[in-house]
């Protein structure tokens, strides 16, 4: 159940903002492309997009993207929505907004799990490149990339018979009990689910096109992002993803995959329990829980 917007965003508003702050772009064709949980995205001409927060809580997330994507984009081997223009709060719209490059692609969430194996190693390469030490002033996100015990009460409240998730209690406990991240805080995307990965649907295998929505970017435990192993892939794709990441980031981290599975459980259960009617995310969340349940008895390390 998508939260209601606390501000109305439409073509007329965005056109007025462009005329006010970026008049050289104001006459390009403009259409609404996506109306998400936190932001509205409009396509601007053929090559650009405009992203505006539809809820006040999303303002800080947009500022994270504006501040950090220009530094992260050059080191990532995939397209990301790097800002090309910045919109500032004004009388017409009291929030920041961003003009980015338009990136062609279809959300991974719309593609079959088996098709995603084709780019599993590539996604591992992207995350391995991202997971460099974060600077001291990197954002802190209280619900992403923190020690799992910080999320224990919230997640355990969902792992009940009522929600058909009691089976997952040992998996969550294993993640909490696993050795924690011993390195310095790492850059993490924070929300690498199939709605935030774009792929190109080709005549042959799909290809990775972009990693989007960096609002939750922060410094912390990279295992948070490795939840992608279950959020995106079946067992074949997951094996390829894990092997590629372990090769690219071989430093000792004995609890890596136990923590990653627990993060996948945390993210997927949040959707199925707290937003059960969310048509955009429900499919990947239920799919991830099925993958976790099928492998619940398998060693993760």
Image: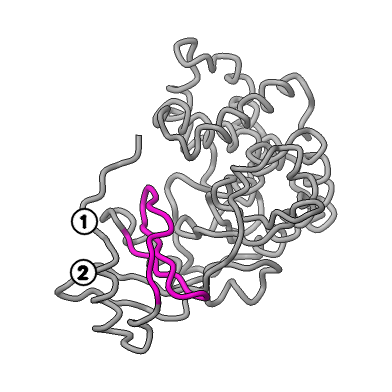
Left or right of 264, for residue 255: right
Residue at 28% x, 84% y is 21
Q: Are marks 2 and 1 in contact (CB under 8 Å)?
A: yes
Left or right of 220, for residue 158: left
Who is closer to the viewer here, 126 or 209? 209
| Disc 2 from disc 1: Cα separation | 9 Å
Q: Which mark is residue 84?
A: none
Tell me the element at label 2: loop
Who is closer to the viewer here, 42 or 121? 42
Image coordinates for residue 13, horizontal then vertical, percent: 23, 68
Left or right of 119, for residue 184: left
Dividing the picture into quarters, in which one does residue 299 lie? top right
Residue at 46% x, 35% y is 279
The stretch of residues the image draws in magenta is 29-53
Image coordinates for residue 116, horizontal then vertical, percent: 73, 45
| Main SS category, magenta section | strand
Dividing the picture into quarters, in which one does residue 64 lie? bottom left
Q: In the image, is residue 151 above or below residue 131? A: above
Outermost residue toward the top? 161
Who is closer to the viewer here, 284 or 153? 284
On whether residue 51 falls in the magenta region, the answer is yes
Image coordinates for residue 227, horizontal then vertical, percent: 63, 41
Residue at 61% x, 59% y is 105
- Of pointers 2 and 1, the one earlier in the residue sequence: 1
Q: Which residue is mark 1?
A: 7
Who is closer to the viewer here, 217 or 206? 206
Image coordinates for residue 99, horizontal then vertical, percent: 42, 74
Tell me the element at label 1: loop
Residue at 83% x, 45% y is 240
Q: Which residue is mark 2?
A: 93
Dividing the picture into quarters, in which one does residue 209 lie? bottom right
The quadrant in which the N terminus is found is: top left
């Amino acid at each position: 159940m998508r939260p209601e917007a606390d501000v109305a965003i439409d073509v007329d508003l965005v056109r007025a903002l462009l005329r006010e702050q970026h008049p050289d772009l104001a006459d390009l064709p403009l259409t609404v492309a996506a109306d998400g949980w936190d932001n509205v995205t409009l396509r601007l001409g053929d090559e650009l997009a405009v992203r505006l927060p539809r809820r006040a809580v999303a303002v800080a997330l947009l500022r994270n993207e504006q501040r950090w994507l220009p530094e992260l984009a050059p080191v990532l081997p995939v397209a990301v929505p790097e800002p090309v223009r910045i919109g500032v709060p004004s009388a017409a719209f009291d929030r920041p907004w961003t003009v980015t490059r338009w990136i062609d692609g279809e959300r991974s969430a719309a593609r079959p799990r088996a098709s995603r194996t084709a780019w599993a190693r590539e996604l591992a390469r992207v995350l391995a490149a991202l997971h460099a030490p974060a600077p001291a002033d990197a954002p802190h996100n209280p619900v992403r990339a923190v020690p799992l015990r910080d999320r224990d009460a919230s997640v355990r409240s969902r792992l009940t018979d009522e929600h058909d998730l009691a089976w997952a209690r040992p998996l969550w406990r294993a993640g909490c009990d696993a050795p924690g991240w011993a390195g310095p805080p790492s850059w993490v995307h924070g929300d690498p689910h199939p709605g935030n990965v774009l792929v190109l649907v080709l005549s042959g295998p799909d290809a990775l096109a972009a990693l989007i929505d960096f609002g939750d970017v922060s410094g912390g435990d990279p295992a948070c992002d490795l939840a992608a192993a279950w959020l995106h892939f079946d067992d074949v794709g997951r094996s390829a993803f894990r092997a590629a990441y372990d090769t690219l980031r071989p430093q000792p981290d004995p609890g890596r995959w136990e923590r990653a599975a627990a993060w996948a459980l945390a993210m997927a259960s949040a959707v199925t329990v707290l937003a059960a009617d969310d048509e955009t995310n429900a499919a990947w969340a239920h799919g991830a829980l099925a993958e976790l349940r099928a492998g619940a008895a398998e060693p993760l390390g």
